[in-house]
Image: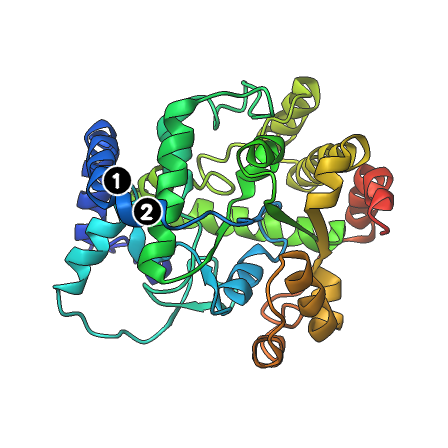
């Protein structure tokens, strides 16, 4: 008797989502055109919506960025993307109109793919704008090409489309402040500040040992899930999530020699040292930006995951102040009750493995007070 491997439900991609996502990805030129037509139709309304101090959350995956996005989205002024906005990210107002005409049940929350205890629905906030970045910048996710976009970058077509898109998000979510989570925006901080000089940027960071353990766990999980269900791999490629899995692509922030070392370590199966060196590579780049650019230093708040878990109330207040959002005691109180250190797994590193992580990361970690 034959046995069929059962795929984990967390890695199931519904047929309709897979088909529609594939279609939009293959016809992105048409969808950009349609997005421009949408803008033309709504131009009077959009021009009355200023883009004020957009908020960007960008840190390595597993640093606490999702809970920060959920926290900010709970604020009445904030508008952001949700799972339901994919696949037609290019035309948010049209899609919002279509969805409003289709009755749909309110499903119970389910644990997200990461299996980290975070419960989500189609209306939960999520990183979706990477779809737009990939449409206008073809090299962003090629680890052999430098992925930095800085103040010298100029892409007028993208800049207009993107600004119009933000205004559309403010319109459909009835907000005055746009917020986005995007790990890859770490390499675009300078460019974002060129586009929006008043932007507020939050860079979450986490102690190297616990961060490396979490990233290694996710890599194993995603590789297994994508092996059992290739549709999930294709889905994440379309959405622009290359942090984990069979198509893992590190961010190239300039030092190609170190990046090749990291990729070689992963290829050789030395996941722990590879992740630790990657942590130091990325956050070392951030530390250099903060030290060399007063503009970036004033726009960026580095938020430690440990501070969020140990003192959620004060940390949330500090976050809202940095983002220039009115403090909300109710928000701080309700969200803070949900924030805690992970209790769904334990770190099983040996003393030698912990020493490896510390050796690779300590010089950079010290720059952030670890």
Picture coordinates of residue 259 (x, y %)?
65, 25
In-image side of 203 versus 69 (left or right): right
Question: Can you say whether 49 is above or below 117 in the image?
Answer: above
Asked if one can make out residue 206 in the rendered structure from this viewpoint, the answer is: yes
Residue 273: numbered disc = none
The residue lying at 25 percent from left, 55 percent from top is 4
Q: Is residue 243 left or right of residue 278?
A: left
Q: Relative to 120, is 295 above or below?
A: above
Residue 7 visible in image = no
| Circle 2 Cα neighbour tier, 10 Å, few/some/many (<14 / 14–19 / ≥20) | some
Mark 1 or mark 2, which is nearer the start of the sequence?
Answer: 1
Mark seen at residue 39: 1
Q: 201 above or below 364? A: below
Q: Nearer the viewer, residue 218 or 290?
A: 290
Residue 82 figure quarter:
bottom left
Q: Which residue is mark 2?
A: 46
- The x, y position of residue 121, in whole percent, is 35, 67
Q: Is residue 150 found left or right of 96 in the rendered image?
A: right
Q: Please state which of the two labelled residues, at mark 2 or mark 1, is closer to the viewer.
A: 2
Residue 222 place in picture, x, y as percent: 46, 48
Describe the element under mark 1 as helix, strand or loop. Answer: helix
The Cα atoms of the two marked residues, 2 and 1, are separated by 8 Å
* Callouts 2 and 1 close, C-beta under 8 Å: yes
Q: Position of residue 224 (x, y in %)?
A: 43, 48
Label 2: element kind: helix
């Amino acid at each position: 008797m034959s046995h069929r491997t059962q795929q984990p439900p967390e890695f199931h991609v519904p047929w309709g989502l897979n088909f529609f996502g594939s279609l939009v990805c293959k016809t992105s030129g048409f969808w950009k055109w349609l997005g421009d037509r949408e803008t033309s139709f709504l131009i009077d309304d959009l021009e009355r919506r200023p883009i004020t101090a957009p908020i960007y959350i960008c840190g390595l995956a597993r640093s606490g960025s999702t809970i920060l996005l959920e926290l900010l989205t709970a604020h009445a002024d904030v508008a952001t993307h949700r799972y339901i906005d994919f696949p037609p990210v290019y035309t948010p107002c049209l899609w919002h109109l279509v969805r409003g005409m289709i009755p749909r049940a309110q499903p119970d929350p389910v644990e997200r793919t990461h299996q980290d205890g975070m419960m989500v629905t189609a209306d939960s906030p999520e990183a979706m704008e990477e779809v737009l970045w990939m449409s206008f910048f073809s090299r962003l996710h090629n680890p052999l090409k430098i992925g930095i976009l800085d103040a010298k970058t100029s892409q007028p077509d993208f800049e207009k489309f993107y600004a119009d898109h933000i205004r559309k998000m403010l319109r459909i979510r009835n907000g005055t402040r746009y917020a986005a989570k995007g790990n890859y925006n770490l390499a675009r901080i300078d460019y974002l500040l060129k586009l929006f000089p008043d932007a507020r940027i939050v860079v979450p960071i986490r102690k190297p040992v616990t961060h490396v353990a979490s990233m290694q766990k996710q890599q194993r999980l995603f590789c297994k899930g994508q092996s059992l269900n290739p549709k999930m791999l294709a889905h994440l490629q379309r959405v622009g999530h290359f942090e984990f899995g069979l198509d893992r692509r590190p961010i190239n922030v300039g030092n190609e020699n170190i990046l090749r070392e990291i990729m070689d370590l992963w290829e050789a199966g030395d996941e722990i040292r590879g992740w630790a060196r990657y942590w130091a590579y990325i956050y070392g780049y951030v530390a250099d930006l903060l030290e060399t650019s007063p503009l970036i230093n004033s726009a960026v708040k580095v938020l430690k995951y440990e501070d969020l878990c140990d003192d959620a109330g004060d940390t949330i207040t500090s976050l809202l102040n940095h983002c220039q959002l009115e403090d909300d005691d109710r928000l701080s109180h309700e969200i803070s009750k949900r924030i805690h250190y992970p209790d769904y797994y334990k770190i099983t590193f040996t003393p030698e493995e912990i020493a490896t992580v510390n050796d690779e990361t300590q010089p950079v970690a010290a720059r952030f007070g670890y």
